Image (spheres, helix red, strand yellow):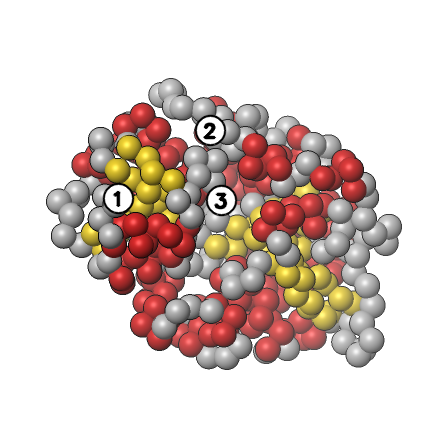
Amino acid sequence: MRGITRWPLCAALALLIAIVAVGCGDDDGGGGGSDDGSGEVVRFQGLPADPAAIPLLVMQEEGLDEKHGFKAEFVEVDPDAAANTLLIGESDIAMEQDAVTMTLAQQEGEHGVVFWPVLNTMMSVVVPEDSDAQSPEDLVGRKVGHFGVDSGTTSVIALMLQELYGIDVFKDYDLREAGPAALPELLKDGKVDAIFDYEPLALRAVLEVPGRYLFEPAKAWAEEHEGWSPYLTNLAARVDWLEENPDLALAAKDAWVEAVQIIEDSNYEIFAEEPYRSFLDLRSDEELEAFIEYCADLPCYLNEWTEKDIEQLNNWLELMAENDVLIDAPPKEPVAVILEDFLGESGGEQGDQEE
């Protein structure tokens, strides 16, 4: 394995520091009753304006939760406290967590797993449209904007560039740090030659600079790994909640699958409808339409989860650990599971879809 500069763990670990101090959450494992007779409540946590939460909104708007015998509730969380919110039992299912945070939780003595993919790796390297750079190798020695060496975006892009191109971002690039929303402006003003940013901010740079994508991690990694790329977010839950609410967990997952299918069937055009349009809070109709096209092309959502996917994810976690990227050791116990197998169910119709 080629060497790579060590990434700080402080930001990722900060998400979990409060767990010990706060202690355990609800004793009943979640899944509280509903006053309107539509079934037990499943609390899905997510971030404001985050595309990861759109399938939940579809679920609510289309009545998919009631169809599957529960009531979906959206719990909006602060990004800095999101992992804690799930692990102390203030929510049941997280839409914005991933296998990295569940690995860190495991290292802190907490037990959570991911059981379905949500978002693809929605981040990119963007350069001005007229830049002479045609490959990440052409950025060596140039000014590159990012928003933190310990951010997930910078970490993932840097690890992929190391593996795919042999580039050590922290030595080979002249890194300039700014806030995520400020990076498109820096690129537009010519203060940097390229930026690392997540969507839709990277897309904003493409529209406003104008710019173009120089490196798209999801596509680049998939080309080398049998069509698989790391997940930006997954559905995650505490092990105790899953074990205490197996039927509810399976119903929630099935409703989620149906919601994503509705989005895919619309070719993401549903984003232009309410309440999704307002929730995404994009700057303009142009940005909204460009985001729809971006998601349809990538695609943004993933709706398949197999043992092969889990094997690839575990390999990715091992690679991250080997290079001290966000985690310093792979999980000792599985953090990614097929829900039906994990809960001891036969899987039924959905299990057939996953095989």
Q: Nearer the viewer, residue 29 or 178?
A: 178
- Classify 10 Å Cα crowding around label 3: few (below 14), some (14-19), many (20 and above): some
* Gap in angstroms between the C-alphas marked 1 and 3: 37 Å
Find residue 338 and name its label. none
Q: For the point 13% across and 44% down, which residue is it? A: 132
Amino acid identity at mark 1: Val
In the rendering, at what x and y percent does residue 271 appear? Answer: 44, 73
SS for dot 3 = helix
Find residue 192 and name its label. 1
Q: For the point 49% across and 62% down, which residue is it? A: 51
In the rendering, at what x and y percent does residue 277 appear? Answer: 47, 74
Residue 9 visible, this angle: yes
In the rendering, at what x and y percent does residue 238 appear? Answer: 71, 47
Marked residue nearer the N-terminal end (1 or 2): 2
Q: For the point 75% across and 60% down, which residue is it? A: 247
Is residue 35 left or right of 282 when viewed as pictured?
Answer: right
Q: Nearer the viewer, residue 6 or 224?
A: 6
* Dots 2, 3 in contact, CB < 8 A: no
Marked residue nearer the N-terminal end (1 or 3): 1
Q: Quadrant of residue 293?
A: bottom left
In the image, residue 96 above or below residue 73: above
Is residue 133 left or right of 269 when viewed as pictured?
Answer: left
SS for dot 2 = loop
- The residue singled out by tag 3 in the image is 309
Q: For the point 81% across and 41% down, which residue is it? A: 23
- The residue singled out by tag 2 in the image is 7
* Gap in angstroms between the C-alphas marked 2 and 3: 26 Å
- Classify 10 Å Cα crowding around label 1: few (below 14), some (14-19), many (20 and above): many
In the image, residue 70 above or below residue 151: below
Comparing labels 1 and 3, the label whose residue is closer to the camera: 1
- Report the residue that reaches farthest toward the right: 27
* Dots 1, 3 in contact, CB < 8 A: no
